[in-house]
Every structure is written in C-alpha cells, then in structure tokens.
Image (spheres, rainbow, N blue to C red):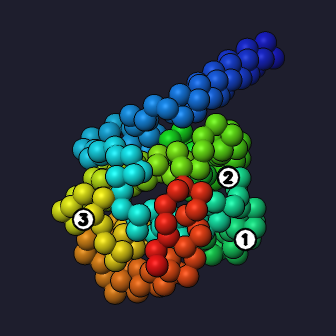
Amino acid sequence: MAFYLRRAGKIVLGVVLAWAALVLVLIMLYRWVNPPYSALMLGQRVTGTPIAQRWVPLERMSPYLISAAITSEDGGFCRHRGVDWGELEEAIERARDGIPRGGSTISMQVAKNLFLWPSKSYLRKAIEIPLTFAMELAWPKRRILEIYLNIAEWGPGVFGAEAAARYHFRKSAAFLTPREAALMAVSLPNPFDRVAGSPGPGTVRLAGNLLVRMRAAPGNVACVGVRGAR
C-alpha cells in the first residue's frame, strides 16, 4: 500500500512540475506572442459556447477605455509589482465576514484568466500569486494590460475589448467614447448582470462615478504610455 501511495505521489508531483514548467515557458513566449486562448475561453469552448474575440494592440484601443479599466479595476496598477497586499488582505477579511470583495489586481486577473480556473478558492489564489510575480518579471506593464484587455470577458462568449465594443456598441474599440469606455469598465466584474450596451440605472451610476475618478487621477495610466482622461 505504501509503495502505491509513494508512486501516486511521484506521479502527481511530476504532473505539477510539468504544468509549472509549461506555464513558465508560455509566460516567456507571451512576452512577444499573443495568446490564442485563455483557460477561461477554452473552458467555454469545451462546453460548446461560441467564442468571439479579435486581438488588437493597445494603441488601437480608445485611451478612454485604457484609463477606465485601470481606474476601475486596479488604481494602483502602475505602482504595485503585481499584488496589492492591502487590498488582498481586506478582501480576505471581508470574505471571512461573508462580504464578497475583489482583491485581485489586473496582473492577478491575467494570471487567473490565462492559466487557472475561475472559481474562487485559497488554493487558486496561492497559485495565482507566484504566477503574477513571474509575469511581472517577464512582461512590462503595457504588455500585461494589453493581454488583459484582449482576454477579459464582456458577455456570453465575448472576449476582448474589440469584440466587446462591436458587440455592445457596434463600433471598434478605438472609437469608444468616455461614457462607453466607463460602461465597459464597470461591467468587468460581472458582465452578465452589468451589460455595457444596455445598462441599468445602477450600472449607469457606477459609470458616472468612474468618469469623475478618471478625471481626478490621470496619472493612473502613466506606466502604459497613454494620457489619462481629463
């Protein structure tokens, strides 16, 4: 019995090490090569959900969308090194009290969406953090944001800013207005309840508040080489 347990343990360890090596290779590769799929996209494709995505470089996205996404999802994106420990600690404390709160930075969301599973757990978070540090070492902030905005989910089978802009507003992501960009950004945490193209009063209110914050903190986007909203 002990022999079989040791053998099973070696097999599991081998699989884990092989997966870790593959992920590290992909992280290095994705510095220059655009990821064809994220883990989340593959999961939906397996279930038969049609996937709409069109990759576009950051310079072909509206600067308002870039500013809105950073301000809404991770105001400290240009200052931290992948993990905002204060936000993460607060999210854990609130989770213990039964109050859901996201503590993931944009970098952490990229690590999760590219390589991990969507359901929340301490195990996933424990894997997500070292992956985030590896990405931050290998990629500049601009590349992290570019991948984030190209693999983020914005509706049923709708991934990436370009597909989302066409789905919700019938236009390219390059031509989004400040209001449209804000609506897309505030829908990111839950794009099925907060529909950017047909927003409810709550989503409209969140977008309005975000526009004010974008104008108040234009420096939030300095590390990606675009001007903040004014």
Three-letter amino acid code of the residue under disc 3: His
Secondary element type, mark 3: helix
Q: Position of residue 127 (x, y in %)?
A: 67, 42
Secondary element type, mark 1: helix
Residue bearing mark 2: 82
Q: Earlier in the sequence, mark 3 or mark 2?
A: 2
- Report the residue at 54% width, 39% height from top: 115
Secondary element type, mark 2: loop
All told, the count of numbered labels is 3
Horizontal relation, residue 35 to residue 27: left or right: left
In three-dimensional space, the C-alpha distance between marks 1 and 3, rounded to whole angstroms, equals 33 Å
Q: Residue furthest left?
A: 170
Residue bearing mark 1: 90
Check the picture and name the quadrant holding the N terminus: top right
Residue bearing mark 3: 168
Q: Residue furthest right?
A: 2
Three-letter amino acid code of the residue under disc 1: Glu
In three-dimensional space, the C-alpha distance between marks 3 and 2, rounded to whole angstroms, equals 30 Å
Three-letter amino acid code of the residue under disc 2: Gly
Q: Earlier in the sequence, mark 1 or mark 3?
A: 1
The image shows residue 7, relative to residue 222, as above or below, that is: above
Q: Which tag is nearer the camera, tag 1 or tag 2?
A: 2
The image shows residue 206, relative to residue 9, as above or below, that is: below
Q: Position of residue 50 (x, y in %)?
A: 24, 44
Q: Position of residue 28 (x, y in %)?
A: 59, 29
Classify 10 Å Cα crowding around label 1: few (below 14), some (14-19), many (20 and above): some
